């Protein structure tokens, strides 16, 4: 029993990390149809924000509280810069944006290497996070629980934003039907910019969370990005809940298989599962009901 | 009546789309330069150039798949790696059995229990190896292509799946150190089908073998591009739905292009192993698989010679800059991706017709329209109608 609970919770925590990494991307992919390969580097920016904040704030817990909004703003700013500088001219060529953003990710990675050095930087983790709590007989690190909670809070916040605010309604309208939204007077270009800022900022927060469980290196983002892509693809475009289900499912499959075998076999199985799943539902878990052919 | 009509259409299409005389002159010049290169290069540089030519084989396949078919594969490293590892396994086994050896590659006794895994054994035979190099990657590409394209999964979805495939493949190779050499890969080869590898004469012959393969691939790809298949492929790229309504099956056409690109990548990988003397997961992972695309984009993704030229330029630049200025090269590489894809989506190759057009317009000569039409067929692959709708 405690093994099962432990595995489920481990899967949930892996899934939460994937979800944190993927949620911003699923917003931008859903609305603008572009895959941002630099998304992983926005996660890295968030992680290094913790390091930078800790240069000024020595209390670890306080530094994390300060780092979360800073990471959001910094990553969002870089995101807006990217969107305004390059991507806004390329919305008609979604596949090409994928390669352009890959170029951006190369540059950001190298910049991190030049500024902070290639080895991992030392980050102070608040002491109370390094303990374990036992839950139904399984010992779970507190940091993992915090990540699960953070992911849930962010998902609820984003879904509230999408449901209940004017900005969110505009985002959903543009996602469902851009032309119709435009003729209804919604400023689609400004909405795109906002969505991109929000998606990038969420990646920054994901980076803050990831410093708790892994080392902070310039290539940190690329470790998560492939799985985050799989989550987005399996989750479908229209709904953030698709991403939630896909992330948790992938997380549980990953940790359960890695428990019995190795990490590389777990990766293979997740890849095959996603391909097989797309055989059954090519548009992901939740899809928009439209009359378009594609 | 009907037949003559279609013959007329075919002839007109060929005039618009076929490679022009200047392309053939450029092809001949390229072949000549590459054939004469060993006269002026030292042995080390001949090896380097052969290595770059192996990379360019991947680029030629991508030119057809991505430039003409609009299918962006971020996973060509898988096929390059399959070809490379199959060849490397054969060469390891052959080296180990040569001169009364134990028949067990050295690294296996170093890391593992000194037994050759069962799935290595078929590659003891050179014939099996030479059959497996094209067949295995084509089967993998066909399986993925058929599964994905038939369900009309396309665009960025396919790109991401291909990237996940290459990430999983690299992880698998690294994880299985006792049977694949792990992250060190397979290296230290001495013989290649009975020939001693570090003999200068054999090195030069190997270079010419690689060169001939590249030229054959270029010709075959050129023929495919301007065949009926190539025209339907182009149509699939531009308006997939219309092609479907005309009665073609876009999925099989895209799968065929994917399988063809996989074949070229695999042969490139297989020849890369004797040339470079090593194959490791770092040659085939997520990043190198995307870097393959840079040369294709730079040279002109949908052109006849653009991919091979662009790929050679990128390889040469990387080789001369990345060791001396590693940081600068990373920035340059990133900037090249951004500038080429964003501002010059047709690649350098489209600069020539657009300059010519501009000069014609300036001089006010007639015939400027014809020139622009011809180049438009090869021009920027815009998002297909399907992609626009799905957004």
Image (cartoon, coloured by chain):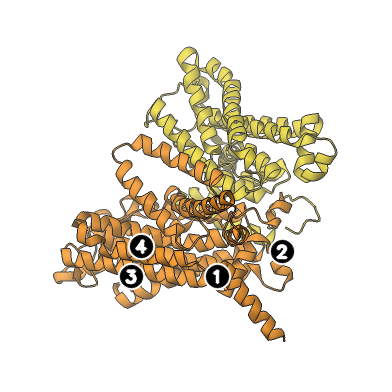
Chain colours: A yellow, B orange
Q: Are marks 1 and 3 on the same chain?
A: yes
Of the residues tagged 1 and 2, which is closer to the observer?
A: 2
Chain letter belonging to callout 3: B
Q: Residue furthest right?
A: A184
Residues tagged 3 and 4 counted as in contact (Cβ below 8 A): no
Lateral position of residue B41 relative to residue A253, left or right: left
> Dot 4, crowdedness within 10 Å: few (<14), some or many (≥20)?
some
Look at mark 3 in the image and give the residue it sits on.
B212
In front of the other: label 2 or label 3? 3
In the rendered image, residue A247, in percent from the top left (x then y), is placed at 62, 44
Q: Earlier in the sequence, mark 3 or mark 4?
A: 4
Chain of the residue displaying label 2? B
Return the residue at label 2. B241
How far is mark 3 from mark 4, CA to CA? 12 Å
Badge 1 is on which residue? Answer: B256
Tell me the SS state at disc 1: helix
Q: How many marks?
A: 4
Residue at x 60% of width, y 55% of height: B381
Which residue is at a point 66% across and 71% down the rendered structure image?
Answer: B249
Q: Quadrant of residue A124?
A: top left
Dot 4 lies on which element?
helix
Is disc 4 on the same chain as disc 3? yes
Q: Residues within 10 Å of mark 3 (few under 14, many from 20)?
A: some
Identify the mark nearer the N-term, 1 or 2: 2
Query: From mark 1 to mark 4, how far is it between C-alphas?
Result: 28 Å
Viewer-side label of 3, 4: 4
């Amino acid at each position: 029993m405690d093994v099962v609970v432990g595995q489920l919770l481990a899967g949930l925590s892996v899934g939460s990390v994937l979800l944190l990494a993927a949620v911003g991307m699923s917003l931008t992919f859903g609305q603008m149809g572009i895959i941002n390969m630099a998304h992983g580097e926005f996660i890295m920016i968030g992680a290094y924000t913790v390091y930078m904040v800790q240069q000024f704030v020595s209390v670890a817990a306080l530094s994390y509280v300060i780092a979360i909004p800073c990471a959001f703003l910094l990553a969002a700013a870089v995101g807006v810069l990217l969107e305004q500088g390059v991507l806004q001219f390329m919305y008609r060529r979604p596949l090409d944006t994928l390669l352009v953003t890959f170029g951006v990710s190369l540059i950001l990675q190298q910049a991190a290497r030049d500024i902070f050095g290639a080895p991992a930087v030392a980050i102070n983790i608040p002491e109370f996070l390094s303990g374990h709590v036992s839950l139904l007989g399984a010992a779970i690190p507190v940091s993992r629980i915090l990540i699960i909670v953070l992911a849930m809070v962010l998902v609820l916040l984003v879904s509230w934003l999408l449901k209940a605010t004017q900005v969110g309604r505009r985002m959903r309208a543009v996602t469902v039907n851009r032309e119709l939204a435009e003729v209804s007077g919604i400023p689609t270009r400004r909405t795109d910019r906002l969505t991109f800022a929000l998606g990038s900022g969420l990646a920054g927060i994901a980076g803050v969370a990831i410093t708790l469980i892994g080392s902070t290196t310039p290539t940190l983002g690329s470790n998560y990005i492939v799985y985050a892509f799989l989550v987005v693809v399996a989750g479908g475009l229209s709904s953030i809940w698709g991403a939630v289900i896909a992330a948790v499912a992938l997380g549980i499959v990953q940790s359960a298989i890695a428990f019995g075998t190795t990490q590389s076999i777990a990766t293979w199985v997740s890849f095959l599962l996603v391909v097989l799943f797309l055989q059954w539902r090519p548009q992901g878990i939740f899809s928009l009901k439209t009359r378009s052919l594609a | 009546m009907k037949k003559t009509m279609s013959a007329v259409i075919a002839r007109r299409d060929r005039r618009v789309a076929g490679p022009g005389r200047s392309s053939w002159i450029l092809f001949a010049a390229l072949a000549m330069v590459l054939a004469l290169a060993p006269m002026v290069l030292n042995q080390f540089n001949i090896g380097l150039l052969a290595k770059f030519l192996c990379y360019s084989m991947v680029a030629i396949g991508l030119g057809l798949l991505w430039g003409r078919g609009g299918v962006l594969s971020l996973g060509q490293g898988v096929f390059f790696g399959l070809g490379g590892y199959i060849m490397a396994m054969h060469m390891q086994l052959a080296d180990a059995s040569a001169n009364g050896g134990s028949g067990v590659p050295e690294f296996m006794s170093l890391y593992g229990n000194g037994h050759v895994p069962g799935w290595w054994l078929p590659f003891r035979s050179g014939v099996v190896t030479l059959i497996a190099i094209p067949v295995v990657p084509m089967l993998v590409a066909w399986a993925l292509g058929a599964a994905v394209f038939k369900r009309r999964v396309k665009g960025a979805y396919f790109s991401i799946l291909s990237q996940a495939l290459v990430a999983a493949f690299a992880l698998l190779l690294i994880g299985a150190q006792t049977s694949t050499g792990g992250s060190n890969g397979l290296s230290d080869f001495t013989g290649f089908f009975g020939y001693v590898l570090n003999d200068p004469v054999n090195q030069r012959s190997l270079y010419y073998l690689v060169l001939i393969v590249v030229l054959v691939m270029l010709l075959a790809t050129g023929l495919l591009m301007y065949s009926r298949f190539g025209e339907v492929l182009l149509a699939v790229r531009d308006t997939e739905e219309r092609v479907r309504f005309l009665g073609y099956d876009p999925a099989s056409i895209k799968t065929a292009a994917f399988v063809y690109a996989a074949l070229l990548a695999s042969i490139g990988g297989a020849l890369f192993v004797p040339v470079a003397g090593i194959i490791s997961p770092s040659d085939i992972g997520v990043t190198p698989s995307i870097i393959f695309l840079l040369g294709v984009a730079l040279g002109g993704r949908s052109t006849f010679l653009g991919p091979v030229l662009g790929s050679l330029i990128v390889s040469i630049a990387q080789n001369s800059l990345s060791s001396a200025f590693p940081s600068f090269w990373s920035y340059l590489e990133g900037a090249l991706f951004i500038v080429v894809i964003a501002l010059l989506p047709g690649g350098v190759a489209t600069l020539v017709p657009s300059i010519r057009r501009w000069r014609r317009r300036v001089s006010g000569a007639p015939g400027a329209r014809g020139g622009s039409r011809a180049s438009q067929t090869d021009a920027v692959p815009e998002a297909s109608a399907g992609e626009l709708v799905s957004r």
